[in-house]
Amino acid sequence: MEFKTPVLMGGGTGANTAVALSRLGLEVSFVGTIGADNYGKYIIEDLQQENINTENLIIDKELNTVGVFAFIDEYGERYLWGWPRTKQSFKELDLQKVDLDEIKNADWIHSSGMVLVAESSAREAVLEIFKLAYEAGVTTSFDLNLRVDNGRLDKDYKDTVLEIMEYCNYVLGSGEEEFYYLKPEENWLDSAKYFASETRTIIARMGAGGSMAITPDQCIEVPGYKVEVCDTVGAGDVYNGGFIAARLAGCSLLDSVRLGNAVAGYKVSKEGARNSPKIEELEEFLQTHKKEGV
């Protein structure tokens, strides 16, 4: 096994999606809380360099910005561990410090389930943001990012996830690894189909197998792109960015799933969670792999 020198890179599931969207030419604002520490300063600079609006980024001197140690094995699979373990800033969000008019006037609101895992102000605030956006007619999407403990979900955590899904137009997650735990069935696809409705589309990511869009009327399955895997950290996050960018551009559901696959395929062939493509890089990738992903 080859060992590499550790490097500091930007990360965080919601931030990875934000960067992927910005690199594809969209105007993006990020809402969240960081500490007034070195990691926090790094995040501000990193997001601003990616042309992301940080005006709604709250800095709290009493909290710690979490750094995640990502260990990548020889197959590109990841093992993650966060530090510090106390006073973690991502669990806190003061709704009074968020520009709610910007929420109501957005074209799209997206969040990750990571902020819902623990009972916290962030859990309550994100739920309220989704209610506000959905009722204002803003398109909403939510990446499950479930944290399963010994084969089960904490009841309050699960109930919050199910509640926020009521205010989602799109719910994205890992097919076999996540949807099953929300409604255990004989297979995960039956679980995923259960949550599809006239106003909610389910997007199931299947790693190298591609992804699937599920509505009450159809299941659209699109194979993945054949690439040499270097690093899978952030693959689902940047998939979300590709999918959202495509939908905002007016692409069909089929083409949006295909674009999500392409952005994720590009990323896993590179090192680092933020190595998503810019528009010209994505176009080159699609040209090189034009016979795949269809």
Image (cartoon, rainbow, N blue to C red):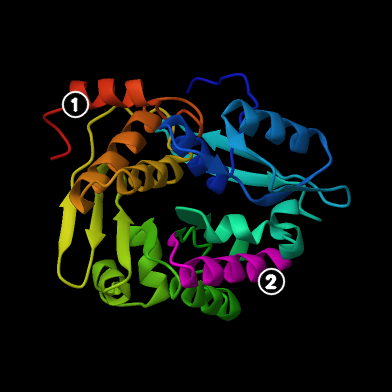
Q: Nearer the viewer, residue 28 or 63?
A: 28
Residue 246, quarter of the rendered image? top left
**Callout 1 environment at 10 Å: few (<14), some (14 to 19), or many (20+)?**
some
Q: Nearer the viewer, residue 84 or 234?
A: 234
Q: Mark 1: which amino acid?
A: His
Q: Mark 2: which amino acid?
A: Glu
Which residue appears at 15% of the width and 70% of the height? 217
Which residue appears at 76% of the width and 38% of the height? 40
Helix or strand or loop: what does disc 2 sit on? loop
Residue 119 numbered tag: 2
Q: Which of 77 and 207 is in front in this view?
A: 207
Q: Where is residue 64 in the image (x, y as percent from the top left)?
A: 80, 47
Residue 219, quarter of the rendered image? bottom left
Q: Where is residue 135 in the image (x, y as percent from the top left)?
A: 48, 73
Residue 289 numbered tag: 1
Q: What residue range appears in magenta?
A: 121-140
131 in the magenta segment? yes
